[in-house]
Image (cartoon, rainbow, N blue to C red):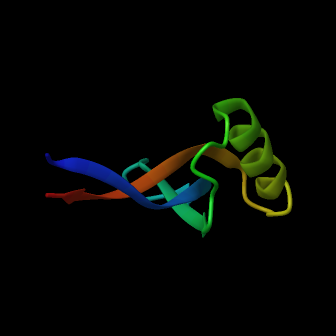
């Protein structure tokens, strides 16, 4: 039987870093490792939002990126 096994997760925070000459938003990101597998969406968003407040750049958004393995 094939299963999917959780490997790790990271939280990524996006910031606005200005605009290009043609008006497109440039963004920068900061990645935080070792996010718990069972972290609730509300708690994760609040934590990443609070970390984003430490930056001088404006906060755009956040995401959780999970890596898993498919095992036979």
Nearer to us in this view, 5 or 59: 5
The answer to whether residue 21 is seen in the rendering is no
Q: Which of 3 and 32 is in front in this view?
A: 3
Q: Is residue 66 left or right of residue 2?
A: right
Question: Residue 21 sits in which quadrant?
Answer: bottom left
Inspect this view and state whether residue 27 appears.
yes
| Of residues 34 and 63, the one drawn nearer to the viewer in this rendering | 34
Residue at 64% of width from left, 33% of height from top? 41
Q: How many labels does the image show?
A: 0
Residue shown at the point (43%, 53%) measured from the top left: 66
Q: Where is residue 67 in the image (x, y as percent from the top left)?
A: 37, 59
Question: Which image quarter holds the C terminus?
Answer: bottom left
Q: Where does residue 63 sit, x and y in percent of width and height?
A: 53, 46
* Residue sitting at x 76%, y 45%: 49
Residue at image position (28%, 49%) is: 4
The foreground one among 21 and 26 is: 26
The answer to whether residue 59 is above or below residue 17 is above
- Across and down, in percent, residue 48 comes to 73, 50
* Residue reaching furthest to the front: 1
Residue 12 percent coordinates (x, y): 56, 57
Position of 2 compared to 14: left or right? left
């Amino acid at each position: 039987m094939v299963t999917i096994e959780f490997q790790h997760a990271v939280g990524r925070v996006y910031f606005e870093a200005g605009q290009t000459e043609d008006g497109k938003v440039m963004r920068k990101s900061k990645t935080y490792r070792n996010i718990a597998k069972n972290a609730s969406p509300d708690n994760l968003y609040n934590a990443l939002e609070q970390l984003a407040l430490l930056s001088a750049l404006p906060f755009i958004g956040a995401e959780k990126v999970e890596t898993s393995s498919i095992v036979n």
